[in-house]
Image (cartoon, rainbow, N blue to C red):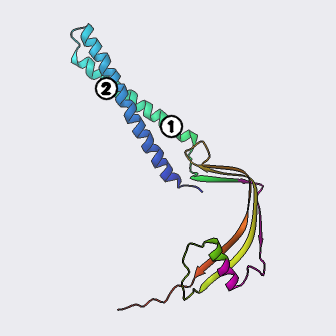
């Protein structure tokens, strides 16, 4: 799944500006320390010289920002938000008369989630199905954009069980005008 390239560039540029601001503060601190050393060793420094040093630091910082921005642009835009890597995936879905039909599906739903209360008056569904499944997979990884390690890293997966899909018909609503 990809992010909008324009928004990614905006975020990258903001991060670069933020980092350059911090780096510029470090450079200014180093310059101030050098100026203080110069004050200690040469009792008098012309004011124009100090202003010239700060101006050259400003030009240097702008040049560094432009260089880093060009490098970032050359590297390309990382638009991928996340990625699933799945290898040797097999899915087997079976329908069986013992799990098919409204009564059997309700029975399977209550077995899968016994803690949820079932209404006494029952429910009507627009979508209602149940399947027995078996899933095999050699590798399953989930990568987030800015993290080098996978968020999820599974190997040799075997899962089986029942999956129920149900969508309740909405209750009638009364509109009062």
**Residue 51 appears at what percent x and percent y?**
26, 22
- Position of residue 65 in the picture relative to residue 142 (left or right): left
Residue at disc 1, secondary structure: helix
Q: Which residue is the site of mark 1?
A: 70
Q: In the picture, which quadrant includes the N terminus?
A: bottom right
Is 169 contained in the magenta span?
no
Q: In this view of the protein, can residue 128 be seen by the observer?
A: no
Q: Are marks 2 and 1 in contact (CB under 8 Å)?
A: no
Residue hosting label 2: 55
User: Which residue is located at x 54 percent, y 86 percent?
Assistant: 120
Return the residue nearer the eye: 2 or 118.
118
Asked if residue 131 lies left or right of residue 14, the reply is right
Q: Secondary structure at mark 2?
A: helix
Q: Residues within 10 Å of mark 2 (few under 14, many from 20)?
A: few
The residue that appears at 31% across and 18% down in the rendered structure is: 33
152 relative position to 42: left or right:
right
The reply to whether the magenta stretch includes residue 105 is: yes
Count the numbered circles shown. Answer: 2
């Amino acid at each position: 799944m990809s992010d909008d390239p324009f928004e990614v560039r905006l975020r990258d540029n903001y991060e670069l500006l933020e980092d350059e601001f911090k780096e510029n503060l470090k450079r200014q601190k180093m310059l101030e320390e050098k100026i203080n050393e110069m004050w200690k060793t040469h009792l008098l420094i012309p004011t124009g010289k100090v202003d010239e040093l700060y101006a050259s630091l400003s030009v240097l910082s702008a040049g560094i920002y432009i260089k880093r921005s060009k490098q970032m642009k050359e590297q390309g835009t990382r638009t991928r938000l996340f990625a699933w890597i799945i290898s040797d995936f097999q899915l087997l879905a079976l329908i069986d008369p013992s799990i098919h039909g409204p009564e059997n599906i309700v029975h399977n739903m209550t077995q899968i989630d016994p803690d949820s209360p079932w209404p006494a008056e029952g429910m009507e569904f627009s979508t209602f199905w149940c399947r027995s499944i078996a899933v095999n997979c050699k590798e399953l990884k989930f990568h987030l954009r800015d993290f080098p390690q996978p968020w999820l890293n599974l190997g040799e997966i075997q899962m089986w069980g029942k999956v129920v899909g149900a969508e309740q018909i909405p209750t009638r609503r009364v509109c009062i005008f």
